[in-house]
Image (cartoon, rainbow, N blue to C red):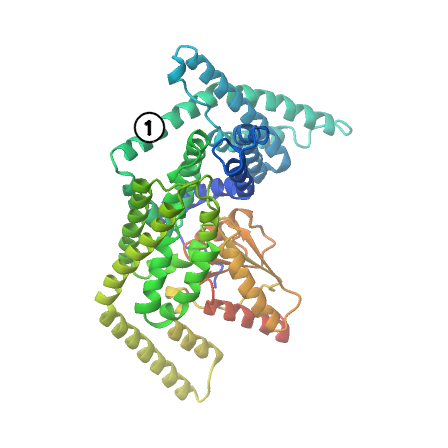
Amino acid sequence: MTTASVPASGTKKARVGVQRFGTFLSGMIMPNIPALIAWGIFTAFFIAVGWTPVPALATLVGPFIHYLLPILIAYTGGSIIYGVRGGVVASIGTFGAIAGSDYLIAQINADLPADNQLGQVHMFIGAMIMAPIAAYSMKWLDSLWEGKIKAGFEMLVNMFSAGIWGFVLAIIGFYPIAWVVNGLMQILSNAVDWLVSMNLLPLTSIIIEPAKVFFLNNAINHGVLTPLGIQESADTGSSILFLLEANPGPGVGLLLAFTFFGIGAARASAPGAAVIQFFGGIHEVYFPYALMKPMLILALIAGGMTGVTTNMLLGGALRAPAAPGSIFAVVAQVANNSYFAVLLSVVLAATVTFLVSWVILRASRKRDLAAMAATDDAFGAAITQTEAAKGKSSDALAGLRGGAATGADGGIEPATMTEREIKSIVFACDAGMGSSAMGASVLRNKIKKAGIEDVTVVNKAIAALDASADLVITQNQLTDRARQKTPGSVHVSVDNFMNSPRYDEVVDLVRSQHQDGV
């Protein structure tokens, strides 16, 4: 636990930058996943090839994806940066981009034969571009006359300035943004088509699986795969791109390997992590297991490639994004006649990851056991010897002994006391919905069992952190970003989301404050 900021190396800065970019994209997409699910249900039931075709209700499908979803994403992104005002101007600008794209497609189609005309381009990437442009520019413009408006004219200026700037943004969206996004979507679509035609789509796992483990997946998933997948799904009814990152098979395969062949705390916690990952869809729980032995990333890549290959050969695809990446969410979004292919891809991905992980874990088992024994016995003996020399036990030494017994969360520094009174504890993760919710629930129960009543424990996205947080808990790969958001808070890094020894240290710290005062 520390409040000090550690200077980041160039590599760390780059990783944090990509994570921050991915978090912003995730922050625009994730809150709107319910709308994507609703759209997926409409397509599953009511389109011509759906389960229960209803032509009248099928007319909702097109406007839903072409207008509502991009504008929702733009509003969410704008509001993240500049509240409701930022969301409104971002929505206006995105509507201009939608109209500009439609106009451009109509102009192109006028010169093409009827059987070779282009379809609509849905402005998901356009919304993700317009949102920060619109919100930041509106925020900057407001700062120019902040405090300079005569009393009684504030509302007039605020309304007209946003309306006029929204008008300008709509024109910017209509011309340069729409043209750029259409060209970008064409390039990306052609790249995906080329990978499919050359049977190279499984190679994407070489990028996606390591990116997931280092929390860099959001930039790829929400920045590229989701917009392209939605575009393809709107055109054909489904997309394999939704399964490149969301397949729960590789993660559960890795955790099952630890369940049977792991050692120590990793083996003890792996079964529970497997249940949470596979059924709860919180993939972050398996990342620490891969990071503790990076060679296992090869197993994840092999499993990911197996799943993609299976879906590519058998036609497995989803109608809409599966979020969270639970097997339930995956099954709920499976396209018609694709159940066998998708379920087989999950099983085979898990099996291949399990087998490759087994080989890696078995190959290093003796070395790992020796290292664990040396660490536990030598460190434990040293603690005992120190206590004997001191003549009594020590809470601090007991904490060290606990760290030695549990692996200390992969080398994260133990908790230290703080002069700041802990009233608000925030568990933060990338999107503020998955691992942070689970960790907050675990810690909240521990706080309650300790009889502590006036301490709140909530979960948030890192981007939503503010100075009101007295103590912030994050996964150790995300702590640097959390420190940058709230440098004045106490920061705790954890590795095991479900039962980290850091949680008990936090409870002990808060309990000691209640008993002895800050």
Q: Position of residue 18 (x, y in %)?
A: 40, 43
Residue 121 sits above or below residue 228 on the image:
above
Q: Which quadrant of the figure has residue 362?
A: bottom left
Name the secondary structure under disc 1. helix
Which residue corresponds to mark 1?
Answer: 190
Q: On the picture, is 320 further left or further right than 451?
A: left
The residue located at (45%, 48%) in the rendering is: 331
How far across and how far down the image is residue 266, in percent? 37, 67
The outermost residue toward the top is 111
Q: Nearer the viewer, residue 307 or 461?
A: 307
Q: Residue furthest front?
A: 52
Residue that appears at 40% across and 17% down? 117
Q: Between residue 366 and residue 1, name the one nearer to us.
A: 366
Would residue 331 appear left or right of 510 to someone viewing this image?
Answer: left
Above or below — where is 107 with respect to 26?
above
Given the image, on which type of amino acid does mark 1 rest?
Asn
Residue 167, position as x, y percentages in the image: 60, 20
Residue found at x 49% / y 79%: 395
**Number of on-image labels:** 1
User: Does 137 appear above or below 360?
Assistant: above
- Crowd band around label 1 with a 10 angstrom C-alpha radius: few (<14), some (14–19), many (20+): few
In this rendered view, identify the residue nearer to me: 31 or 390: 31
| Quadrant in the rendering for residue 420 | bottom right
Give me the residue at 51% from left, 56% from top: 436
